[in-house]
Each structure stands twice: as C-alpha cells, then as structure tokens.
Image (tube, helix red, strand yellow):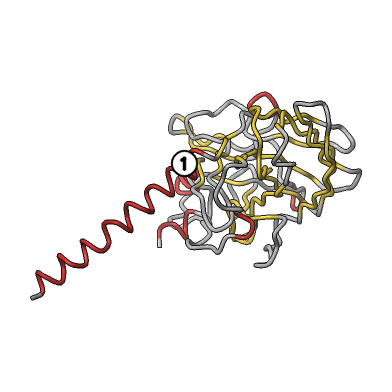
Amino acid sequence: MKHNLTLITALLLTPLAALHAAETAIAKELTVQVDVDGLLNVRPVTTLSADALVPWTTFLDSYGGGSGFLTAAAARALGDEQPKALPDDPLIPAHGNCPEMLLHYSNKDGVGPQARQVDNEVPFIVAVPRHKYRQIFLAWTSGSASELMIDCVYANGTNTRHTAWVRDYFNELSTNDHSRVSVVRDLDKWNRSGKLMERGHHSIHAAIISPDPNRELVSLKVTKKASKSHLIFWAATGVLAGSPTDRTHETPTRPLPASSETRQK
C-alpha cells in the first residue's frame, strides 16, 4: 500500500514538475541580461581570487572610513563560517517579483571592474538589445537615498521619461512596493582590511522601469539628480513584452534570496 501511494504521488508530481520546468524555461527565454561591461568602473566587492583576498577599492558608503561587500568565499577566508555575503555565483536566481539577474563580480577576476559609480548630473547610457520590453530592472546600492531621471529611448526616435527613487541600502523594501525589488538582501559590510563593520541588513535593490511595451526599446539614459548620496549601479535585466506575467504583480512563490548565510540554512 505504501509503495502504491508513493507511485501515485510520483505520478501526480511529475506533470507539476514538468510544468514548473517549462515555466522556468519560458521565463529564462523572456529575460534579457543586458551587457553593461563597458559601463563598469569600480570594485566595491572583496573577492577571493587565486587563493588571495582582493579588497574592494570603492566604498558603498563612507561611514567608518568606508565599507564594501564580500563574496562568501572571501568572508570564509576571513574566518566567518556563516557569512551574510554575496553568493559566489553572481547569477542571482529569479525569486518573488525579481527576475534572474546577473551581477558582475567574480572570484575568478581580481582585477576587472564590478559596478559603476554614478556621479551627480552626469548621465550614462544603458544600451539594450533591440526588443519590446515589459520591464527593465536596474540594480543599485545607495548610501542615502538617490533620485534618478531615466529616459527610455525607442527605435522610432521617441522617448518616455521616468523617475525612480533608490532607497538607502540599509532599508528594507515594503511588501507592497511595486516600483522596486530586492535582488540580494541582508548583507554584511566590511572595511578594506577585512574587519566586519556591520552585520546584515544591507541590500542590492532594483528599480523597476516600465517602458512602452508597444515600442522597440534601444537604450535608457540615466541621470542621478544632485544630492550627497553615494550611488552604485550593479546590473540591468529586461523582461520582454511577450512575458505571460508582469513580475511586479506576481504572487511570490519562492523566498527572497538573502546572503549566503540564509542560503545555507
């Protein structure tokens, strides 16, 4: 009898597993990881590269002389066995309202830039593969809140203007916030010498931009309005207009990935 129940359960779960796999494949197909390598100019993440710690060189905030993130491998090399650190794999899985996002740090690279420091009133262009998009997710950390002006530029020469607020990266997002999502949350911050400055509570957030889904998007012009905040841009991911779901109104079915400590539990 027990064997029969196990068989019946397996038969029932198999179609569900197949459906989930198909949905995952469709979601990946409709997600575009935007190439931003040419925009990156700073290293805010300490890595463990060639068995040696490579300290961050640009801080995320200036408190206490400056702090940055660590990869999980780097944190363990410093003796933290349960670090709240960036996962060693920079491809962050889709979760809740956030699509799969590729960040640009790597333990295999102890030299190259990982993110972009954004200056006041100095615009930069995020070129995207030419498609019709439902949403663009722009990942940030901000020491103090930042206000952004974002112009979506379309293939027909027109544009739409959007405003986005990036919260201080210490602050959690509310559950009913449909303009932002957390990409990775509850991260420690460390100084360049490998001293833990503050345990957990820091996040990489993404601002959600909704271009016109009926026009082909070619780029986004991003301008940080003048303020004393310290803004870092991490990555851009697009969700094509053919997506069957709008992720900002999707009911989360999986927990939000936090630091590597949470992933290990």
- Specify whether 67 is left or right of 96: right
x and y percentages locating residue 182 in the rendered image: 62, 55
The quarter in which the C terminus is drawn is: bottom left
The number of discs equals: 1
> In this rendering, is residue 25 above or below 4?
above
Answer yes or no: is residue 187 visible.
Answer: no
Answer yes or no: is residue 93 visible.
Answer: yes
- Specify whether 33 is left or right of 88: right
Q: Which residue is disc 1 drawn over? A: 89
Rendered image quadrant of residue 192? top right
Rendered image quadrant of residue 114? top right
Residue occupying image coordinates x 66% and y 27%: 130
Rendered image quadrant of residue 242? top right
Of 98 and 117, which appears nearest the observer? 98
> In this rendering, is residue 143 above or below 42?
below
- Specify whether 79 is left or right of 203: left
Residue occupying image coordinates x 9% and y 69%: 3
Circle 1 residues within 10 Å: few <14, some 14–19, many ≥20? some
Of 234 and 80, which appears nearest the observer? 234
Q: Residue furthest top?
A: 38
> In this rendering, is residue 118 above or below 85?
above
x and y percentages locating residue 105 in the rendered image: 56, 36
x and y percentages locating residue 150 in the rendered image: 81, 40
Q: Residue furthest bottom?
A: 1
The quarter in which the N terminus is drawn is: bottom left
Dot 1 amino acid type: Asp
x and y percentages locating residue 251 in the rendered image: 55, 64
> In this rendering, is residue 216 above or below 171?
above
